[in-house]
Image: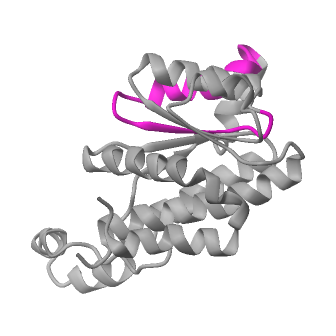
Amino acid sequence: MMRESIMSIVDNLFVNYPDLKPYEDKIIKAFTVLKECYKNDGKVLACGNGGSAADCEHIVGELMKGFKLSRPITNEYYEKIESLYHGEGDYFYQGLQGALPAISLVSHTALLTAFVNDVDPDMIFAQQVLGYGKSGDVLIAMSTSGNSKNVVNAAKIAKTLGMKVIGFTGQNGGKLKEICDVLIDVPSTETYRVQEYHLPVYHALCAMVEEEFFGKQ
């Protein structure tokens, strides 16, 4: 059962975006997948094209640093820093925040362009999933149509590694529908509208996971 503070994030999402209320079960399932990933020292990978690539960067930014909470580092880690670098514990304590490990697969320009040029552009994300991914990790696969070949290929490879896949698509889900463990197929087929729905959903998920691991118990 979710804590009240986490459920309030879900409730607030539907107050602001009532069209998303039918997706409550899927959003909660996606949260559960992310929670289990991080409980077991996993990480999140994210891929998409165009506006969805920007969303991947956005998601990673919310996970890897404080989003709504300050996320101070643990006392144990503070003491470790202080024992190694006496007198610098406060400096690092004030300058660092707790992180939820996440990697955007759209960001590595040299790797992406080399792979497009030398191998296969449809495998640019799948190659990185193969390199970074392990069982228990999560791939966030973003495609407004659900049919982007490089995203679909990444999702397929993620499944072979024992990863979970959370898909963000438009209505009907496209090819990702058959691959994803959780599919958030928002109620539109217009690209810009799909992306407008995706943002509040992933903001809510990031806030929920942050509250789970860094909120007051």
- Against 29, is 152 above or below? above
User: In percent of the image, x 42 and y 29: which residue is there?
Assistant: 163
Residue toward you, 165 or 153: 165
- Against 138, is 197 above or below? below
State the image coordinates of residue 23 (x, y, percent, origin top left): 60, 51
State the image coordinates of residue 13 (x, y, percent, origin top left): 60, 69
Residue toward you, 84 or 27: 27
Residue farthest to the front, as pictured: 22
Q: Which residues are magenta?
A: 118-145
User: In percent of the image, x 46 and y 44: which residue is there?
Assistant: 44
Residue 17 quadrant = bottom right
User: Does the rendering let one see residue 66?
Assistant: no
User: In percent of the image, x 34 and y 34: which residue is there?
Assistant: 136
Check the picture and name the quadrant holding the N terminus: bottom left
Check the picture and name the quadrant holding the C terminus: bottom left
- Against 1, is 115 above or below? above
User: In percent of the image, x 33 and y 65: which residue is there?
Assistant: 212
Q: 216 left or right of 172?
A: left
Is 131 inside the magenta-drawn segment? yes
The tally of labels here is 0
User: Does the rendering let one see residue 59?
Assistant: yes
Residue 116 quadrant = top right
Q: 208 left or right of 123?
A: left
State the image coordinates of residue 55 (x, y, percent, origin top left): 69, 54
State the image coordinates of residue 155 (x, y, percent, origin top left): 58, 26
Residue toward you, 92 or 135: 135
Residue toward you, 97 or 191: 191
Is 167 inside the magenta-drawn segment? no
Q: 84 left or right of 201?
A: left
